[in-house]
Image (cartoon, rainbow, N blue to C red):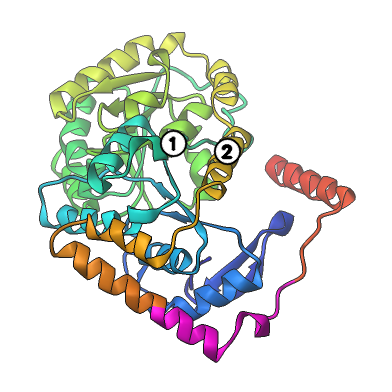
Amino acid sequence: MTHAYNNRSGVRYMTGGLKVYYVPWKPFLMQNTFPTFYGTLPIVRTILIREKISLVHGHQAFSTLCHEALMHARTMGYKVVFTDHSLYGFADAGSIHMNKVLQFTLAEVSQAICVSHTSKENTVLRSGLPPEKVFVIPNAVDTAMFKPAPKRLSSHEIVIVVISRLVYRKGADLLVEVIPEVCRLYPNVRFIVGGDGPKRVRLEEMREKHSLQDRVEMLGAVQHSQVRSVLITGHIFLNSSLTEAFCIAILEAASCGLLTVSTRVGGVPEVLPDDMIVLAKPDPSDMVQAIKKAISILPKIDPQEMHNRMKELYNWHDVAKRTEIVYDRALKCSNQNLLQRLSRYLSCGAWAGKLFCLVMIIDFLLWHLLQLWKPAEDIEEVPDFILSHDQDEGISQDNENQSLR
């Protein structure tokens, strides 16, 4: 279940029987819907009953739809799981408010998932969740989509690829200082920068100032389907993030056989073995030294061998199995009545705790009013979608053919 995207709203059926509800709520800021607290209760309730849902899994701390859906699901007695994909601070005003919202959402979550051990530590500190309720399940990469170039690239010219949103958090300001210095030290190095954002102007100005138009190629926004075709044109992948819980982009680059240079921040040191990545402090001079080291060890890198190692290290089937274990744990959690649930919210703070209790009591009353106005028995349940073995094989074959194309 997600919000509407442009003209796409309603129900869509995806490959393999996946059903997506595009709730007719338009995003208003950073792909987030306007927070209404209770406005989504009727449609969330209808979907949960229609689809005979037994567990609700929400993603991303900044998603207002996620927070509201988990709140309504707990009110209705469903088990809930939350996955946090990001790291947040503790000092700035935005983080302080966001952490309090997260504390409210996770006050009675059944289980939680984080994508790295650093992310787990951050989430536990921000939300006050017991560490034994939080599992670490890393992201993965579809290695069938991200394969190295058929022919090994020439080493006469070294191409460094950057694919990232050009924003402050992704370290775009670091790139402005790093790129000219690397180009000065290595006349045979060329940069390809894919991505868009408010910091693109600074990179364009840097290119003009140092007359690097022929050595720094700016691609603009890159569709995910085109990422592999950009990656395989390079030797080194550069990640300059200032904060990162995991970074799937590094996995995609390594799967394509690129040696990675990255800032040592957040969960990045957990992502790849030491011989597949060169880490640096988020400082321009240290990053230049890391790129120097990467260029020196580049002849030892075998893209195909790196791809084969990535196949063994990361796959989505393993992620699915581990997530299913978390679901089983969540379904075994005991049910609690309203008073028991409110006691958890009271512990969230002297004033915030009382406010959270009021929000939940109103949600509980509105849910009962909906039960009277439209009983669950009057909501039609959808028939189960059963994928036959023949259909399953056919879909798998289609996916393989699409990957080959």
What residue did someone put label 2 on?
A: 325
Residue at 34 percent of width and 58 percent of height: 105
Q: Quadrant of residue 212?
A: top left
Confirm whether the magenta stretch covers residue 357: no
Q: Nearer the viewer, residue 60 or 30?
A: 60
Specify the segment rendered in magenta: 365-382
Q: Is residue 290 above or below residue 382?
A: above
Q: Nearer the viewer, residue 143 or 236?
A: 143
Q: Quadrant of residue 71?
A: bottom left
Q: Is residue 377 above or below residue 221?
A: below
Residue at 24 percent of width and 52 percent of height: 200
Confirm whether the magenta stretch covers residue 374: yes
Q: CA distance from mark 2 to mark 1?
A: 10 Å
Residue 55: percent from left, percent from top: 56, 57
The number of discs equals: 2
Residue that protrudes farthest toward the bottom in the picture: 373
Residue 104: percent from left, percent from top: 29, 59
Residue 296: percent from left, percent from top: 33, 10
Say which amino acid is labelled 1. Phe
Main SS of the magenta part reads helix
Say which amino acid is labelled 2. Ile
Look at the numbered discs 2 and 1 and tell me whether their residues touch, using CB distance below 8 Å: yes
What residue did someone put label 1 on?
A: 135
Query: What kind of element bears circle 1?
Result: strand
Residue that protrudes farthest toward the right in the picture: 390
Q: Nearer the viewer, residue 179 or 247?
A: 247
Instruction: Look at the image and tell me in which quarter the C terminus lies.
Output: top right
Q: Is residue 12 left or right of residue 204?
A: right
Q: Earlier in the sequence, mark 2 or mark 1?
A: 1
Can you see residue 60?
no
Can you see residue 373?
yes
Q: Is residue 188 left or right of residue 55?
A: left
